[in-house]
């Protein structure tokens, strides 16, 4: 596979003013006719170069120009496209080709999922439908006619329905017209026997929009939450960004086979069933919240992505980073802001920091790729969102809004770059973000080393910040970043000290140099700094906090995020000590201060229960691994297991009291306050069961037997599976499956709960799950639940010292690559980080990775990841 570089970007030679598509759906031989109004791009230079179209796995039937058949000898079929000679600056090109949706297991292009036709075109899937200039800077107005037999009564595409009828041979057709020009990656088509729920939304300017969610009949009762979320998102985008929806209809379709969460196709969002369908009986609170955020995310793309789109795929974070920031703020406004922030930062710190430090490390705006699908990463999405958040922090809410207004106004209908976004922010605010731009071009996670000095005599306090960033592939040296560092200074009474004469108690320091000192004067006592409040930048902060200081921050910090973070640092220090003791074969002992800190959090009735639940959770094994210089899996597992057991034992009484207080028979509601209480209750249950005492497990059993919602049911099941004896775990798993076997989403949860369990998810059991009738290698959700659950969420079994976990992931990757390269290239990731492991385990991991490389011809997706990780 060849490498594409950002520096090689050229404007397209030809533009497509309109695109008329005509589909005749058939499982193995769908006929596609496309009629394109093409014209020479005036910005592309002189002459009439040949027209190059992208096309992959297509059976070409005919090519005509202005109604004249072009003989096959005149054009050239390329390995991945078509080259057609051109002798006039404007013409109509008509192409007929055939495709095979039934055998399309890559889930890219047009494919069948449980008898439903659907498409996925981003990033480069449209070329699997027909020959086309498949690049986001070619924007065209699409009209689509779908012809299908009567067993597919629902035929959908982008925009508005303009015609429907029957063909002479008794099939039916529907024609859709999308009035907005769009790149081919936003095209969508659906054909199937679907039911829908309908609602409407009146925009702020008084236009009534029809809202429809389509799914198989059996799931029709699981659409309400998504519909409510959609209406909330529409209202929120008007209130916060002044953005209204622009078509008369907005459709969402649930699909069981889907490579990612969802797709923002214009007017016709297609969703992974798991990210849209929910009911209290079948979905957990976290899936309710996930659905709300993804529905919001895809909806918000209508402006940040569709109305203003990307010039090329290097600019992916332009739409993704911005839209993730938008959905995160939406979720924060709908639920607990601090808890949402904690969840996002935890993910960033473990998975994105690991990516930034690993072999595939790349900037938010990559400079090159072999396969763009590999760059739908945590760096582009989550770190990209942090970059937008930093701009928000630097400009303030109003300044940011002025910037986004200008951006949307200036670039509506255009395909633009990350640079255009930053320029709009600058122009609207009269600021200079020159140095800030390095966040887009430099990879790696910056480290801030902070030291301080207090002068009692004159009341001066000096905070010195040194920044550095480790080398990443292709970037040895880094220039200093512009880092907004939000801080407060705590006095002995726990309150924030005034930082200047006007009494400000929190400031955002502008860190721009390699080393910089910030001075504060008039402080009557030595303060304790609260650094990087709200995680104001995606960096690591090192400051030599003592245990006492962390305990103090945990109790007093005005910033809830930093209270949680202080607890995490404290736990991290304790876990470090335990790991060292484990290595030295000493008796393990947990710091009593940590136990007492957790106890007072548990007893604190003023805190949001969801925050308490977060504060009670020890850093995950994955977080500990990311923080380590070299990963010692065995020590991490032993230390964390010990700490958890010691906490459970010491806090039993408080945990039980809290559990009993919150375990009421209040009817279920997915409102934030109720979700918060359930999350704390179930966190207590999980801890209690760690003791493996009969009383605790009995509570889990009772909750399991009587639960009226999936959150409580799944939490109890998880407790039984992870801590109960084999017989009760078996029985619970069996009865759960019997009850829910018809429900795809619940079965996925059931799979994941087992494969990710340190106790249950042994390799042997995971292999057995793959033989289960409900498992399907062609279904990415099942693969993610079973194989992904084992490789990403079962630290203990995946890291078995014999290396069998790594070998298993290698084998499955090889098998999957033949079916679905995108999923294979993700599945392999856990075995690409071998350099971070010392000794034997690292060697075993590398051997497994090498076996993938040596297994034969790999897809471009998998080849890129494996070859870059073996270097
Ligand atoms: N834009 C899509 C992602 C497409 C991934 C293609 N490999 C979903 C989203 O971010 O909203
Ligand atoms: Zn997105």
Image (cartoon, rainbow, N blue to C red):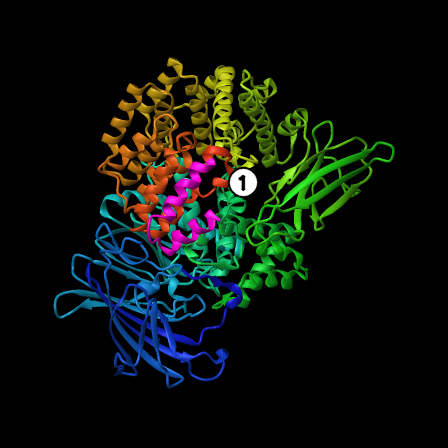
Q: Considering depth in this image, is 825 or 220 the residue closer to the camera?
A: 825
Q: What element carries label 1?
A: helix
Is residue 670 at all visible to an observer of this figure? no
Outermost residue toward the bottom in this view: 87
Q: Mark 1 points at which residue?
A: 349
Residue plotted at (23% across, 44% down) = 218
- As for residue 860 lying within the magenta part, the answer is yes
Is residue 200 at all visible to an observer of this figure? yes
Picture coordinates of residue 242, whole percent (x, y)? 52, 58
Q: Residue 53, relative to residue 523: is it above or below?
A: below
Picture coordinates of residue 714, whole percent (x, y)? 35, 30
Q: Is the magenta stretch mostly helix, strand or loop?
A: helix
Ligand 1's quadrant is: bottom left
- As for residue 744 lying within the magenta part, the answer is no
Check mark 1 vs ligand 1: CB closer than 8 Å? yes or no: no
Residue 705 placement: quadrant: top left
Q: Considering depth in this image, is 211 or 498 the residue closer to the camera?
A: 498
Picture coordinates of residue 838, whole percent (x, y)? 51, 34
Disc 1 residue crowd, few under 14, some 14–19, many 20+, Cα 10 Å: some
Q: Considering depth in this image, is 114 or 491 the residue closer to the camera?
A: 114
Please state the total of marks drawn on the protein image. 1
Point out the stretch of residues depicted in magenta. 842-871
> Is 218 left, or right, of 184 in this rendering?
left
> Is 140 left, or right, of 647 in this rendering?
left
Q: Residue 643, relative to residue 519: is it above or below?
A: above
Picture coordinates of residue 667, whole percent (x, y)? 37, 30
Residue plotted at (25% across, 34% down) = 740
Q: In which quarter of the image is the N terminus?
A: bottom left
Residue 750 placement: quadrant: top left
């Amino acid at each position: 596979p060849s490498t594409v570089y950002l520096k090689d970007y050229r404007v397209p030679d030809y533009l497509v003013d309109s695109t008329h598509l005509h589909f005749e759906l058939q499982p193995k031989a769908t006929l596609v006719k496309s009629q394109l109004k093409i014209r020479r791009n005036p910005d592309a230079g002189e002459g009439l170069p040949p027209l190059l179209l992208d096309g992959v796995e297509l059976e070409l039937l005919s090519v005509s120009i202005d109604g004249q058949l072009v003989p096959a000898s005149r054009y050239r079929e390329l390995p991945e496209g078509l080259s057609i000679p051109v002798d006039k600056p404007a013409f109509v090109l008509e192409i007929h080709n055939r495709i095979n949706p039934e055998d399309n297991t890559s889930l890219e292009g047009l494919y069948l999922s449980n008898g439903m036709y659907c498409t996925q075109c981003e990033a480069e899937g449209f070329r699997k439908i027909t020959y086309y200039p498949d690049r986001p800077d070619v924007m065209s107005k699409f009209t689509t006619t779908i012809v299908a037999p009567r067993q597919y009564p629902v035929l959908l595409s982008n925009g508005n329905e303009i015609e429907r009828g029957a063909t002479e041979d008794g099939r039916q057709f529907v024609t859709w017209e999308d009035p907005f020009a769009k790149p081919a990656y936003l095209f969508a088509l659906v054909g199937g026997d679907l039911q829908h729920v309908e609602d409407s939304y009146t925009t702020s300017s008084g236009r009534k929009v029809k809202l429809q969610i389509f799914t198989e009949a059996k799931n029709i009762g699981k659409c309400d939450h998504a519909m409510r979320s959609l209406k909330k998102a529409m209202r929120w985008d008007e209130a916060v960004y002044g953005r209204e929806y622009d078509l008369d209809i907005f459709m969402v379709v649930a699909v069981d086979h889907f490579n990612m969460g969802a797709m923002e196709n214009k007017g016709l969002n297609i969703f992974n069933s798991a990210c849209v369908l929910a009911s209290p009986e079948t979905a957990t609170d976290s899936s309710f919240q996930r659905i709300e955020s993804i529905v919001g995310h895809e909806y918000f793309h209508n402006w940040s992505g569709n109305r203003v789109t990307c010039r090329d795929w290097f600019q992916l974070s332009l739409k993704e980073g911005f839209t993730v920031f938008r959905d995160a703020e939406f979720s924060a406004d709908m639920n607990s802001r601090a808890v949402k922030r904690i969840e996002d930062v935890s993910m960033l710190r473990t998975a994105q920091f690991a990516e930034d430090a690993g072999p595939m490390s790349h900037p938010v705006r990559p400079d090159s790729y072999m396969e763009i699908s590999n760059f739908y990463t945590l760096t582009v999405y989550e770190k990209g969102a942090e970059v937008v958040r930093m701009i928000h922090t630097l400009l303030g809410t109003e300044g940011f809004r002025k910037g986004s207004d200008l951006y949307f106004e200036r670039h509506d209908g255009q395909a633009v770059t990350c640079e255009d976004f930053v320029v709009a922010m600058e122009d609207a605010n009269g600021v200079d973000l020159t140095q800030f731009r390095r966040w887009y071009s430099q990879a790696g996670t910056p480290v801030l080393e902070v030291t301080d000095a207090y002068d009692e005599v004159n009341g001066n306090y000096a905070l010195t910040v040194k920044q550095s960033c480790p080398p990443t592939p292709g970037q040895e040296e880094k220039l200093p970043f512009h880092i907004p560092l939000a801080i407060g200074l705590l006095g002995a009474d726990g309150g924030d000290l005034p930082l200047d004469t006007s009494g400000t108690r929190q400031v955002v320091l502008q860190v721009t140099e390699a080393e910089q000192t910030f001075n504060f004067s008039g402080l009557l006592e030595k303060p304790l700094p609260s650094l990087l409040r709200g995680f104001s930048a995606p960096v690591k902060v090192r400051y030599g906090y003592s245990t006492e200081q962390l305990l103090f921050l945990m109790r007093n910090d005005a910033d809830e995020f930093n209270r949680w973070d202080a607890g995490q640092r404290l736990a991290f220090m304790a876990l470090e000590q335990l790991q060292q003791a484990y290595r030295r074969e000493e008796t393990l002992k947990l710091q009593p201060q940590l136990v007492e800190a957790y106890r007072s959090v548990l007893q604190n009735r003023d805190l949001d229960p969801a925050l308490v639940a977060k504060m009670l959770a020890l850093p995950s094994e994955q977080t500990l691994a990311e923080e380590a210089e070299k990963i010692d899996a065995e020590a991490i597992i032993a230390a964390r297991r010990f700490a958890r057991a010691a906490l459970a034992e010491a806090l039993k009484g408080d945990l039980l009291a809290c559990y009993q207080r919150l375990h009421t028979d209040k009817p279920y509601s997915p409102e934030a306050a109720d979700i918060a209480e359930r999350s704390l209750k179930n966190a207590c249950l999980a801890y209690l069961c760690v003791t493996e005492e009969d009383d605790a497990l009995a509570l889990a059993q009772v909750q399991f037997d009587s639960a009226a919602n999936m959150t409580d049911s799944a939490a109890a099941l998880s407790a039984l599976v992870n801590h109960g004896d084999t017989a009760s775990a078996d029985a619970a798993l069996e009865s759960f499956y019997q009850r829910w076997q018809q429900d795809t989403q619940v079965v996925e949860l059931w799979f994941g709960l087992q494969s990710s369990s340190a106790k249950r998810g042994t390799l042997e059991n995971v292999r057995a799950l793959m033989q289960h009738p409900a498992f399907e290698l062609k279904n990415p959700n099942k693969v993610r639940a079973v194989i992904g659950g084992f490789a990403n969420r079962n630290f203990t079994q995946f890291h078995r010292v014999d290396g069998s976990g790594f070998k298993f992931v290698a084998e499955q990757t090889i098998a999957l690559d033949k079916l679905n390269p995108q999923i294979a290239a993700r599945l392999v990731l856990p075995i690409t980080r071998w350099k971070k492991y010392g000794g034997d385990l690292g060697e075993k991991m590398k051997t497994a990775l090498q076996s993938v490389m040596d297994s034969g011809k790999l897809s471009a997706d998998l080849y890129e990841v494996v070859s870059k990780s073996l270097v």
